């Protein structure tokens, strides 16, 4: 047994895959989630405490009861468009919610934290691939809500000795290979699940947001990383902190970019039928290309993406969405 990890947002997409990885690494896993965007049936590795991170009394008592060795903090809102329409919601949940976690950790004497950050903190970078020291200048409240937490973590580290690993995800995709958890968003806005769900429904057409970018085929380039690889990086980050490692930040991506059109072709290849699609206008705020420089995670955590080739990402996600459709979702 490696100790106990307190996982906020463990009922969500990335959180649930990480719970599985922590469990497999020997951690006792306790999920704390208000189920506003997470799912009870995805909490399969350890107990669930239902609670909101903004409910400071409940959070403090849960942490005092559990007495975790470390916290992995996933509970957050993650729709860019929603953050533009309702920034207060994002600063409250993502920024103040993270402060509530830190204060509860301080009170309970917990000194190790893994924090889900995002490549959205970089904004529209002027160089590619983006390394951890690429200047951060978010272009939406979601990115700012996470960047503020990165700064707060540094300050809590200096003042209170809380060591943290910030993990900046690129495009999380794919699903658990055994179908035990996967991506379930309502509403769904992401490219790969939308394209796959369209294959299961008649009359659904995917809209490609722009084909006039300065990229190899005119559609946007993103760095898709399998959620199981992300989960492995989190387990390694916990080990790093347990071994006495100091606060660090890592990009989690593959270093390889894939265009929207290449995803559409891969979905057709994996599912065995063409993807109905039309070309629409650009979506506001979409940078042409986002590709990670991820050498640091390889060097310091020994992390190597093993499931992140596009066909593995899409075939595992396809298995999950078929299962979801068969269960009536
Ligand atoms: N995209 C698209 N049509 C959709 C959804 C997404 O063309 O219905 C594109 C989007 O413009 C971006 C890429 O797919 O270039 C990945 O978008 P997603 O929302 O999955 O992730 P993001 O990069 O916004 O985090």
Image (cartoon, rainbow, N blue to C red):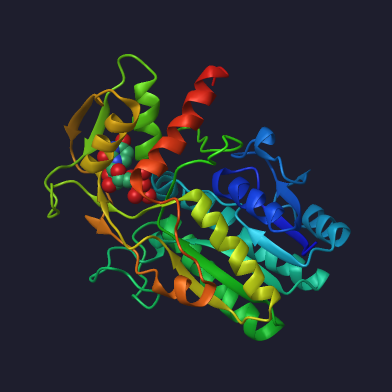
Question: In this view, which residue lies farthest toward the top?
Answer: 202
Where the N terminus falls, by quadrant?
Answer: bottom right
Q: Is residue 120 above or below residue 193?
A: below
| Quarter holding ligand 1 | top left
Q: Quadrant of the C terminus?
A: top right
* Image coordinates for residue 76, horizontal then vertical, percent: 57, 52
Quadrant in the picture for residue 207? top left
Q: What residue sits 53% from the left and 25% below the top?
A: 324
Q: Is residue 54 visible?
A: no
The residue depicted at 84 percent of the width and 63 percent of the height is: 67
197 on left or right of 29: left
Give the left or right position of residue 165, taking residue 56 as reference.
left
Work out whether 242 lies above or below 304. below
Compared with 261, 296 (above or below) is: below
135 relative to 276 in the view: left or right: right
Residue 238, quarter of the rendered image: bottom right
Task: Name the foreground residue: 110 vs 43.
Answer: 43
- Image coordinates of residue 310 in percent, x first then y, are 34, 45
């Amino acid at each position: 047994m490696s100790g106990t990890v307190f996982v906020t947002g463990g009922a969500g997409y990335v959180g649930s895959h990480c719970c599985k990885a922590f469990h497999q690494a020997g951690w006792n896993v306790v999920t704390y989630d208000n189920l506003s965007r997470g799912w009870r049936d995805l909490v399969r590795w350890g107990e669930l405490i239902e609670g909101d991170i903004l409910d400071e009394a409940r959070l403090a008592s849960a942490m005092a009861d559990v007495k975790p060795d470390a916290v992995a903090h996933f509970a957050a809102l993650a729709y860019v468009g929603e953050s533009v329409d309702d920034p207060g919601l994002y600063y409250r949940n993502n920024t103040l919610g993270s402060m509530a976690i830190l204060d509860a950790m301080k009170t309970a004497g917990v000194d190790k934290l893994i924090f889900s950050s995002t490549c959205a903190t970089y904004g529209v970078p002027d160089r590619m691939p983006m390394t951890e020291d690429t200047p951060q200048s978010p272009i939406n409240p979601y990115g700012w809500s996470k960047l503020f937490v990165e700064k707060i973590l540094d300050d809590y580290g200096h003042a209170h000795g809380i060591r943290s690993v910030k993990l900046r995800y690129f495009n999380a995709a794919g699903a658990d290979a055994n179908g035990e958890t996967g991506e379930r968003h309502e509403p769904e806005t992401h490219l790969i699940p939308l394209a796959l769900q369209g294959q299961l429904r008649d009359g659904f057409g995917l809209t490609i947001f722009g084909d006039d970018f300065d990229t190899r085929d005119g559609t946007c380039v993103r760095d898709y990383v399998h959620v199981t690889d992300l989960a492995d990086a989190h387990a390694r980050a916990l080990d790093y902190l347990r071994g006495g490692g100091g606060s660090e930040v890592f990009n989690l991506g593959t270093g390889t970019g894939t265009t929207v059109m290449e995803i559409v072709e891969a979905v057709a290849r994996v599912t065995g039928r063409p993807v109905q699609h039309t070309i629409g206008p650009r979506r506001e705020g979409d940078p042409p290309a986002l590709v990670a420089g991820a050498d640091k995670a390889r060097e310091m955590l020994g992390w190597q993406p093993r499931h992140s080739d596009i066909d593995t990402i899409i075939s595992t996600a396809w298995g999950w969405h078929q299962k979801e459709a068969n269960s009536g979702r």
